[in-house]
Every structure is written in C-alpha cells, then in structure tokens.
Image: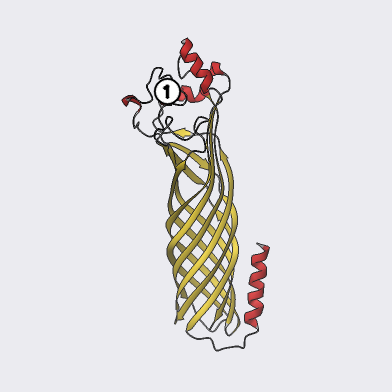
C-alpha cells in the first residue's frame, strides 16, 4: 500500500510540473488509491460424491453396498452452507475518460484486495434428516470453512455527471458496469473422529467394525484459490478540487456489487484418499458458490485533464 501512495505522489509531482492549460472538454487521465470494506459473505458447497458406504477405497469388500453397483451410481448431490464475516483491504485503480459539458464517459481498471480471514465451524446441511444429523454430530470431529483473501481485477465503463460551477470544487455522481476476475482463498475440512467406537457407518458386525476402524480419522480437504469472472455494477459519488487548471485532486466513494461467484475443482483429499468414488472410478469435484460479492470503498483520486 505504501508503494501505491508513493506512485500517486510521484504522479502528482509529474503533472504539477506541466504548464497550466485552460480547462475544457476533452480527455483526462486519473489515478486512485483508497480503502475498501466488504460485508459478510454466505457460501454454499456441493459435490458429486457418493455415500461413505459406496466409497470403493474404504469399502473395497463391497460390504452392505457395492461401490460398483447401480445403488451407488449418481446420487442426488448434497448442499451445505457456511457464513463468513466481512473484511477490510485496499483499492487502487486508473482511468481514462472524455468530458463533454457536465458528462464524463470513462473506462476504468481497478484492483481490490480484502482480507476476510473468517472461519465458520457450524455447517448447515440442506435437507438433512435425523440419521444424517446424528451421524454428523457423532462421527465428525471437525467441520470448518475458512474464507481468506478476496481479490478482484475489474474493467468497468462509467458515466459521470459533474455539477460544474465557477468554484474549485466539483461534486459528481456516476454509475458503471463491467466485468471482474474474482479470486477467493478458501479452505474446507471435514474430519472424522479418530476413535473407531464413534464411527457407526458400517454397523456393529465384525466386518463392519473393521471398516469403521478404517474410516476413523479420515479427512476431506479442499484448499485452493478459486476464480471466476463475474458481471458487476457500481454507484459512485465524489468531489474534485481543482489545484491547477488541468489538475484536480478529490475523494471518491463507490459501492460495487458483483454477481454470484461459482467455481469447481477436485478435493485435495477425499476421506484421506484421492478425489474419486473408487479406484479408477468417477472423479469427485466440489463446487464453491457465494451470494453477491460487494464492497464499499473510499479513495483519494488525482485527475489530469489534457
């Protein structure tokens, strides 16, 4: 962030050395640096996994269920939910625009990086029945999801209206829309208890108890940076102060709202084995989804009018 401020100050010194020009309609160039704050994020996850009894790595004996049989083919996907706190970070951007009268049409690139660093260990599972709930409470020692950094690189087209007057101050409002490449650092872990006596998936018969021992202590982990390209819009309000005829500095407030995020990949490990239903079988992929991603930013901006 210090480097961004030094860049802004260097640009200010450069343009301030240019001879004054009569302010008029025409092109301008802008730089911005500021702080960003994002509200909480709700995430949901699903995958194409089978039930534990259909896991061909664990249940290689085909006890109670045959992992290769029709009863273990294409089950209805599960769905589970987590809630994460908001976070704070930085925003930096650059813009090129054209002013005519009170209107400005602008193309803008901006970067935002927000650190959520929020852990939720109270999963909600859709359509969970009593048996599933009992198994989750009895067999699982850990269920957690961690949302780390949320980073976006955005290209927007904006339309601004300047309330121009003889004053050095020029308030303005604007709207914009565009696309953003969003990346989320996300960690998800499901860990079964290490005590085999807590595991009841395969029942209490001798063969089932052996499989319960095999299942005890296994973990499912997904740890990755997920990326998606989403559409977004923003509302802008600000005020510029004219330092020289061709140079202004100001404050800019923006509210940005991006569409729902979605990305899928294989688990890093599934019940402590590779991300597949059985050896040589269908690969298991999970999908991370969010509701709309939003942030509010306040930035210091510099404009040079050609």
Q: In which quarter of the image is the N terminus?
A: bottom right
Task: Examine the rendering and report whether any part of residue 115 can be seen.
Answer: yes
Q: In this view, does 299 lie above or below 267?
A: below
Residue 38 in the figure: left or right of residue 79:
right
**Total marks drawn?**
1
The residue under the point 64% across, 80% down is 14
Across and down, in percent, residue 286 comes to 44, 40
In this orientation, does residue 204 appear? no
Q: Residues within 10 Å of mark 1 (few under 14, many from 20)?
A: many
Residue situated furthest front in the rendering: 280
Relative to 240, say whether 183 is above or below.
above
Locate residue 65, reporting x and y percent.
38, 20
Residue at image coords 50%, 72%: 172
**Residue at position x 54%, y 22% from top?**
216
Residue that lies at the very extreme toward the top in this rendered image: 206
What residue did someone put label 1 on? Answer: 53
What color scheme is it?
secondary structure
Horizontally, residue 30 falls left or right of residue 175, namely: right
Residue 39 on image: x %, y %: 53, 50
284 or 124: nearer the viewer:
284
- Taking depth in this image into account, of 244 and 193 the one nearest to the observer is 193
Q: Nearer the viewer, residue 88 or 52?
A: 52
For label 1, the SS is helix
**Does 104 sit above or below residue 267?**
below
Which x, y percent locates residue 7?
Answer: 64, 70
Residue 219 placement, left or right of 15: left
256 or 216, which lies in front?
A: 216
At horizontal 33% and vertical 24% (from top left) the residue drawn is 69
């Amino acid at each position: 962030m210090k480097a961004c401020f030094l860049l802004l100050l260097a640009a200010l010194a450069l343009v301030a050395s240019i001879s004054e020009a009569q302010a008029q309609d025409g092109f301008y160039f802008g730089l911005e640096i500021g702080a960003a704050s994002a509200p909480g994020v709700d995430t949901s996850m699903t995958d194409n996994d089978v039930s534990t009894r259909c896991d061909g790595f664990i249940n290689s004996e085909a006890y109670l269920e045959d992992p290769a049989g029709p009863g273990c083919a294409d089950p209805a996907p599960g769905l589970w939910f987590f809630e994460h706190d908001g976070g704070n970070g930085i925003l930096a951007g650059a813009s090129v625009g054209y002013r005519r009268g009170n209107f400005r049409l602008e193309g803008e690139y901006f970067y935002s990086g927000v650190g959520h660093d929020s852990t939720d260990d109270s999963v909600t599972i859709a359509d969970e029945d009593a048996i599933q709930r009992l198994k989750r409470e009895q067999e699982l020692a850990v269920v957690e999801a961690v949302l780390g950094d949320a980073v976006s690189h955005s290209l927007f087209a904006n339309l601004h209206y300047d309330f121009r007057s003889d004053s050095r101050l020029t308030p303005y409002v604007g709207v914009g829309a565009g696309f953003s490449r969003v990346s989320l650092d996300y960690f998800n872990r499901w860990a079964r208890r290490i005590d085999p006596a807590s595991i009841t998936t395969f029942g209490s018969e001798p063969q089932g108890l052996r499989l319960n021992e095999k299942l005890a202590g296994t973990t499912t982990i997904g740890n990755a940076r997920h990326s998606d390209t989403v559409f977004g819009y923003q509302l802008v309000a600000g005020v510029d102060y004219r330092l020289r005829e061709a140079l202004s500095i100001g404050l800019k407030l923006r509210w940005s709202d991006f569409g729902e995020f979605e990305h899928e990949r294989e688990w890093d490990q599934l019940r402590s084995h590779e991300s597949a239903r059985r050896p040589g079988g269908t690969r298991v992929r999970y999908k991370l989804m969010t509701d709309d991603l939003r942030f509010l930013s306040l930035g210091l901006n510099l404009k040079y009018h050609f």
